[in-house]
Amino acid sequence: MPDFVFEIGTEEIPARFLPRLRDQLVETTGRLLQEQELSAEVTSYATPRRLVVYASQLPAKQPVREELVTGPPVAIAYDDNGEPTKAAQGFAKSQGVEVDALFSEQTERGAYLAVRKTVGGNDARELLPQLCQELLAALSFPKSMRWEASQATFARPVRWLLALLDSEIVPVEAVSLTAGRQTFGHRTMGAGPWEVPEAASYFEILRDKGRVILDVAERTRRIREEAEAQASAHGGRVAWDESLLGEVADLVEWPQAVLGGFDASFLELPRAVLLTSMQSHQKSFGVENDAGELLPYFVCTLNLVPQDLDLVRKGWERVLRARLEDARFFWQVDGKASLTTWLDQLDKVIFLGPLGSMGDKARRLEGLAGEMAARVAPEAADSAQRAGRLAKTDLVSEMVGEFAELQGFMGGVYSRQKGETASVAQAVAEHYLPTGPESAVPSNAEGAVVALADKADTLVGCFGLDMVPSGANDPYALRRQALGIIRILLEYGWRLSLRDLLSWAQQAYAKDVQWKSEPGVALETLETFFGHRLKAYFQGRGYGTKIVDAALGAGWDDVPALAQRLDALHGFAAEEDFEQAVLTFKRADNIIRKQGTQIDGDLDGGYSATALQEEQEKTLAAALEDLAPRWAALWEQEAFDDLFGLLRELRPAVDGFFDHVMVMCDDPELRHNRLNLLKALTDRLSLLADFSKLQV
């Protein structure tokens, strides 16, 4: 069976596009081949200048199979004289056969005209051009460009196409180009063009002549091995940043690691400052000793083997030295400034339009942090207040002005340097955490409280200005802020009411703020927003959608309690009798929902045991009475697993009630009493989950 290679040659594609493109190439090509009944092992490759998909052992033809196609009913296919009607003629024409080839096929709906057709058997070479065009059209990018007359879009301009099925050219036509057998290599080390005689030789030619390493895993391994060897020769090891390593591997086609050095006096700078100077601005890595202390070396990655390696190394060293000189200057200037001066300067920095300055925000954080800490960590209240006041001071420092990604961290460094306690400095350094679903949360209670205050302040401010995220539009990262609050509450187990937390943050704003959304409405919208974030968070943790919806239906104001209820419901759902239990309790819930609004008088769960008539309703009432003290004790202990166990114990009485008792009877007083009996049941159910969300 033949091999197929399709290469899309482009101008340099940003490195951040490539990981997703590799996945898209495999997924889309595999799907398109499957649709054409062509099974093959598909692999993909991507470098800055090319996207490649390779299908090995591709069938030369589609399989041939017979297919039964039904058409109109026989009753309307022929007239009274037995002649085919337009319905029969049209069906035959649509299937490419004569009317005589049609026959009657008996189906569940009656007799229908039918025809047997042989389908498939097309050559892969005939199918591949259209398939490649569909692949090109299906690829998506964060940003696209137009560059030629057809107005086609792609990540970057496409310069050549190569498509070979073994040794045959597959004539793919797209973006004003026609595929051939030519490829182009590394811009300076093997530009080409190079003729590729057959698909199987593509990789060898591109590597040996074009000087391109297609596989990102191989490029990564090469960078790592060369860098470690050079660092080891100077008594160190590379301080790898895996995310940056992945980016660097996608910036090059022929990686060459080079070790450079800098003056040891720069080691007086904080480690994060040194690494940021190397990583953010030069895509380089630091070198450290076995104790984790940085050494005066760095490793960079070239995209070629230079003729004069020393000259290139000196160029990198010169650029880094300039960056480090700047950083040392900022460090020295900031060291002379006082926190009081910086706090005053915050009043000149705008936070967000009508919401005042960063100075206003710092004062709000001071009050909020103290109020929250008093409830969840009283011993840390004073430190949390101080950390909240200082949290934003580094925004006016020279260092953060140049290295924005160091905000928070430098605040912690400077706070400690200028006499604050270790706990305050740590809180300031970590108050932006967590920054994502997997990042760490603040490591001390002070930092966690300030982080809660900071995120809540931003959320209520933005929602008050009607800046609600929609679709992919979330310029202030409000989803991430909400997720941060959720994760802190869960990981610290703090039983703060979410509504109270948001209300305190809202009340901390000045009375003269011109809100665009009425405060009460904004708060409700924000609570709903948190419901969506909680759903996404728990789904991401592996819980089923319906289970999450049911748990959220019982409320989410207490986030740790929600997590415990959800876990218990998840366990309950794994039991053999879960489906029957859901049907039973949903029935009770549905009756209250539908009938509770159609009767005179309110339903409050207060029923009269003496007014009950049927044995089964008396049994249910007795079961509820017997369960009440145990339920209250277990609820107080938050023993949610045991509470779901009580529902299992209660279920036979509920089933018996529904089997023998007419709830909506003619007697209005009896009907009302029976509905209140069910209301007493559903009131307990609703504390655990919304059973109407559980579809079984």
Image: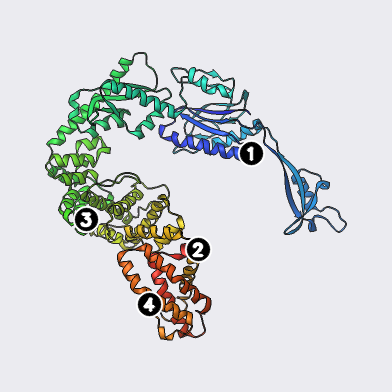
Q: CA distance from mark 1 to mark 4?
A: 64 Å
Give residue 37's mark. 1
Q: CA distance from mark 4 to mark 3?
A: 44 Å
Q: Are marks 2 and 4 in contact (CB under 8 Å)?
A: no
The residue type indicated by label 2 comes to Glu
- The image quadrant of residue 38 is top right
Mark 2 or mark 4: which comes first in sequence? 2
Identify the secondary structure beneath mark 2.
helix
The residue under label 4 is 625
Residue 251 showing in the rendered view:
no
Mark 2 or mark 3: which comes first in sequence? 3
The residue type indicated by label 3 comes to Leu
The residue type indicated by label 4 comes to Glu
Q: CA distance from mark 2 to mark 4?
A: 25 Å
Q: Are marks 2 and 3 in contact (CB under 8 Å)?
A: no
Q: Residue at x 53, y 76 (%)?
A: 659
Instruction: State which mark lies toward you, 4 or 3.
Output: 4
Q: CA distance from mark 2 to mark 1?
A: 39 Å
Q: Residue at x 46, y 22 (%)?
A: 212
The residue under label 3 is 368
Instruction: State which mark lies toward you, 1 or 3.
Output: 1
The residue under label 2 is 579
